Image: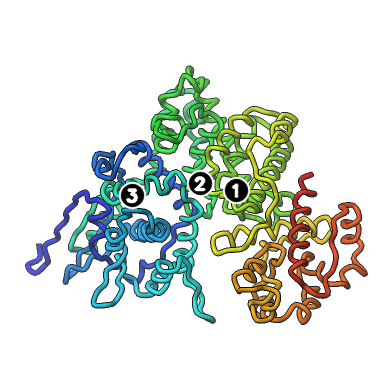
Amino acid sequence: MKENKELRIVDSKVHSLSEIFSASYTVDFYQREYVWQKKQIEDLISDLTIEFLKNWKPEHDTTVTGEYDPYYMGEVVLSVKPGNVNSVIDGQQRITTFTLLLMYIIKRFENTPDFPKSDMERLVYKNERGAWKFTLGIDERNKCMKALYEKGSYSPPDGENMSVSIKNLVDRYNDIGECWDDRINESNINCFVYWLMGNVMFSKVWTNSDEFAYVIFETMNDRGLSLTQIEMLRSYLLANINDENRQDSMELYDQVISELATVKLSSKSKAEFEFFKIFFRGHYADNLSQSADSNSDFIVIGQQFHRWVRDKSKDLGLNTSGDYVDFINKIAFFARKYIYIMKKIENRKDSVTDYLYLIVNSDYGFTLQSALLLSAISYNDTDAIVDEKIKIVSKYLTKVLSWRVWRHTSIAQSSMEDKIYKLCKQLRGKNIDEIKEILATEPIEIPELSTPPTLNMMNKPKIRVLLSLITEIVARESNESDYMLNKENIEVEHIWADHYEWFSEIFPNEADFNTYRNNIGGLLVLPKSFNASYGDMKYKDKVELYFSQNILAQSLCEKKYTNSPGFKNFIEKSNLDIHSYDDYTRDSITERAELYRQILLWNWK
């Protein structure tokens, strides 16, 4: 050892969330992006809900939560610098996400009797001489985090672009609201919060050496969960294949895993891990319980699918070497169909003509789509049959999602997972005609298309997709197909400008004005540049400008009806009441909302 080299110390201890979040942290400048995606939020909320509900009973009070099972969230690796500064080497994503989760819970449930608001606030931020300092202190995020905490929303100042981290903070905060499981509500939120603070555990690994901290970090990440499960499944399957066939099966398995690794998921999850979960759940799982039965097929596959295959080998028909060879062949077949589906989404501009509904469901952020599609495919289906099944099932799924969005009904994973996997069981092994018959019975209950939706901060991304779908239905039937969300910077546009004073004689107060202005009948999807240039104008001054935009905007203009044979043919065959507007009144918004509803009904008649 060199004479003046500082002694490198390393220590590790398990701490509760409350203990971890009682300290303050920072990250080095080169490590500051927050990159979690919606899928990780869905999984986190689902896992926390399941673990909590395993223990909770309605008769419990908060004092009992100390006896509940703990839930482990992995390691937080720190480099402790001079001045007792905790620099996060690994764990930034989880610390940030749990901060957002705590903020959301406070905002939503703070008026619940006996809610421990002050205890939670101390975990979110510290008030240092009048200045806010969040648990993970990153200066560029403070303004956004404070706005999310106080108002539940954040928009950057005019002319300021959002960084990757800021955009993800806003989106993930909104995702928490969308993904929230309503089984956690006012009746048990206090128990849930005390369990969250006291029973969700982290291993805090710290050292006083940056260099050694990264050695620890790399060692841990070289043992990733998904890779371990894939390797352990590989070992188990190959060990049961005779020497004569083992090499070919090994090469096929390895090749397919390599192909899966080329799929880029928007959630940033590993496709090879996601595939095995949805394949085993969708095609083989019998017990799909997500409640306290932690030994259900659904739960075990999500946690340790390699162990599930081993334990269920007889149920899976794995008895001889040939059975294991066939099983790997099936894995390869379905993995390549999964890749085929995901590549269609990835190459969306080339796919949208034939696979519109596949793309729309992806735009809704519906991560369970691939599970449903894969379950409808049978082993050794031809390419033509696979394509037909994808189109049939994805169109049905778009109806389910769009109807729910229209009625302000959640399409989050926590709300839909049980319904989707029950339908997966129904579709297993069915041919095209049988699938059509099943879907014709509306196996997933959907609400009536009645009261028009109203735009708000929470549903804005979904309304954007719904409006783009309605626009594309009209465009396709008019031979003018041009899916809006394949373009850059498409936004929801209000037909009425945000000027209550222009309408004060019609509406007694601004709240009533905003309700009508945000009605779907008063909305379009248009490029951000158009909205920035003309969004503040009166309708009569900008209506002719709509003629340069998409077909739904053009339909407001009289001249659209003079020389558009495809559009006029669509109106005639659909018998829809599509017409222009010289002025756009309150009645116009009501009429237009009804038109949008009728377009959806006509498309799925």
SS under mark 2? helix
Which residue extends farthest top?
319
Q: Amino acid at mark 3?
A: Asn
Q: Quadrant of residue 469?
A: bottom right
**Mark closest to the chain's N terminus, 2 or 1:** 2
SS under mark 1? helix
Identify the residue position indicated by label 3 in the image. Answer: 190
Q: Looking at the image, is 223 positioned above or below residue 562?
A: above
Placement of the C terminus among the 4 image quadrants:
top right
Q: Amino acid at mark 2?
A: Ala
Residue 502's disc is none
Determine if residue 238 is in view.
no
Determine if residue 330 is in view.
yes
Identify the residue position indicated by label 2 in the image. Answer: 271
Placement of the N terminus among the 4 image quadrants:
bottom left
Name the residue at 77% across, 65% down. Answer: 552
What is the total number of numbered labels drawn onto the structure image?
A: 3
Q: Looking at the image, is 160 positioned above or below residue 370?
A: below
Q: Is label 1 in contact with label 3 (beta carbons under 8 Å)?
A: no
Mark 3: few, some, or many residues within 10 Å (few <14, many ≥20)? many
Q: Whole-percent x and y of residue 76?
A: 28, 55
Q: Nearer the viewer, mark 1 or mark 3?
A: 3
Mark 1: few, some, or many residues within 10 Å (few <14, many ≥20)? many
Q: Amino acid at mark 1?
A: Met
Mark 2: few, some, or many residues within 10 Å (few <14, many ≥20)? many
Work out how far the residue at label 2 is from the one at label 1, CA to CA, in angstroms.
Answer: 9 Å
Identify the residue position indicated by label 1 in the image. Answer: 342
Work out how far the residue at label 1 is from the one at label 3, CA to CA, in angstroms.
Answer: 41 Å
Q: Nearer the viewer, mark 2 or mark 3?
A: 3
Q: Is label 2 in contact with label 1 (beta carbons under 8 Å)?
A: yes
**Mark closest to the chain's N terminus, 1 or 3:** 3
Name the residue at 61% across, 57% down. Answer: 462
